[in-house]
Image (cartoon, helix red, strand yellow):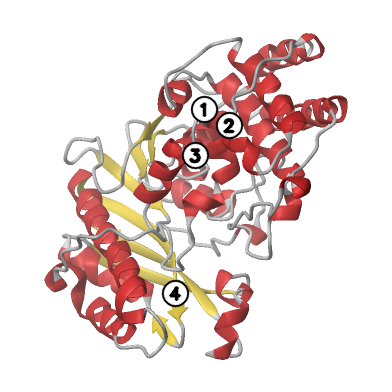
Amino acid sequence: MLVINPKRVTEEVEEKPYWYNYYAGYSHSFAKNIIDSSGLTESSIILDPWNGAGTTTLMSSIGGYRSVGIDLNPVMKVIATAKQATRNDVEFVEAKLRKLSGIRSRVTQENDPLRYWFKESGVLAVRRIENWILEGGRFDGMVSKIESLSPQQCVLYTALYNCVRENLKGFIPSNPTWIKRPKSDAEKVEIEWLVFKRRYAYLVSEMLKGLSLGTHVWPPDRASLIIASSANLPLPENCVDLVLSSPPYCTRIDYGIATLPELAIMSDSSADRMDDVRRSLMGTTTVSKKLEYNEVALGSVCAKFLSEVQGHSSKASATYYYKNILKYFLDLSKSLVEVSRVMKVGATFVCVVQDSFYKDVHCDLPSILVDIALISGLNLDQKHDFESRQNMVNLNAKSKSYRDQSTAYESVLIFSK
């Protein structure tokens, strides 16, 4: 199996460069090399249980393979579906774009979550474009709306995500996965409709260039994208030939907050569903009240790390932070049991993970994952380590009181069943 540095900064095969830039993930080149060198057949199925923005499912489609992409964050299905659009969808989107100038205004909701950041003009601009994308359709919830979308509509939504993010740059600090909120209404963003509309049309046009590539032709059912949990995969036993994925790292990145603007776009009537999504995601910074710790299921390396976190002298280490990190590993354990369950005998699991620190305590996530995978019925065949110069640890100024600089290592772990 051909393994290169998974970091996206090493990108050679940049598919769809103007698309949503999601922090988490490995490069298209890395995924392509893994898939091409895995010895798959025409009938093989590839799974990504943490599909995110859809790199695995995109490169599977380009390679001619069927794939299943699972993610619990509904927004990620929109982006991953957009990446499944092909050359055949370009004409439809271009024709749709020509009608952008004639779209009507619409009434906005008083409790629209976009009001976190935008004044009325901004909320109205975003909702006008969304109404145009949906052609006036109404839905009873975020998930039903997303499940109704075609790949062409997902392309249009993804451009809207990017356009909204451009207007929120002032609220995105050095940590790109944390979105701040204005302290007062005066700080909220005003949007001029014509400027916003022109920029949106430009972003759609740039995205269409990626769709026009000669490699972007495949059947519409090549990838199956599902909103579901990695800890409860909606798949039968022994059905997958290759699992290629990267779980959320143990870095306390709140992926619900990271996609808050996109969740706000998809949830135009209430913030309740957004909070539900945030609390359900693996790695969430919200803590469950009931946690049952099974040391046997997590292995000795994890047990040692958890003990050091619990015994740390810093504030809330023994309570909030311990519970938060324990929940992460319990979710990871459940997910690996599920991955093992759906893999065929002889199938391969390629997993990209990165180590990190809790204060001055090293979290050797690769070793912990190897332990949990072994308990789940998987054997480690190969391990490749790459130094990660760009990592979230060094963006946290408070961490420097515990250590000057942290060198993180990204590991590619290859398991078999």
Q: Left or right: where does residue 340 sit relative to residue 120? A: left
Select label 3 or label 4 by which is in front: 3
Q: Residues within 10 Å of mark 1 (few under 14, many from 20)?
A: some
List the residue tagged with mark 1: 269
Q: Secondary structure at mark 3?
A: helix
Gap between marks 4 and 1, in whole Å?
A: 39 Å
- Give above or below for 339 relative to 192: below
Q: Quadrant of the N terminus?
A: bottom left
Q: Earlier in the sequence, mark 2 or mark 3?
A: 3
The residue lying at 42 percent from left, 36 percent from top is 273
Q: Residues within 10 Å of mark 3 (few under 14, many from 20)?
A: many
Mark drawn on residue 39: none
Depth check, mark 2 against mark 3: the one in front is 2
Is the Cβ of the residue at disc 1 closer than 8 Å to that at disc 2? yes
Which numbered mark, 4 or 2, is in the foreground of this view?
2
User: Circle 4 — which element?
Assistant: loop
Q: Given this view, does label 3 or label 1 mark the residue nearer the observer?
A: 1
Q: Residue 150 or 16: which is nearer the viewer?
A: 150
Instruction: Say which residue appears at 77% left-offset and 14% top-offset.
Output: 100
Q: Marks 1/2: CA distance?
A: 5 Å
Q: In the picture shown, does residue 77 fall above or below 366?
A: above
Using the rendered view, name the quadrant where residue 162 is placed: top right
Q: Which residue is mark 4?
A: 355
Mark 4 neighbour density, 10 Å: few (under 14) some (14–19) many (20 or more): many
Q: Point out which mark residue 76 bears.
A: 3
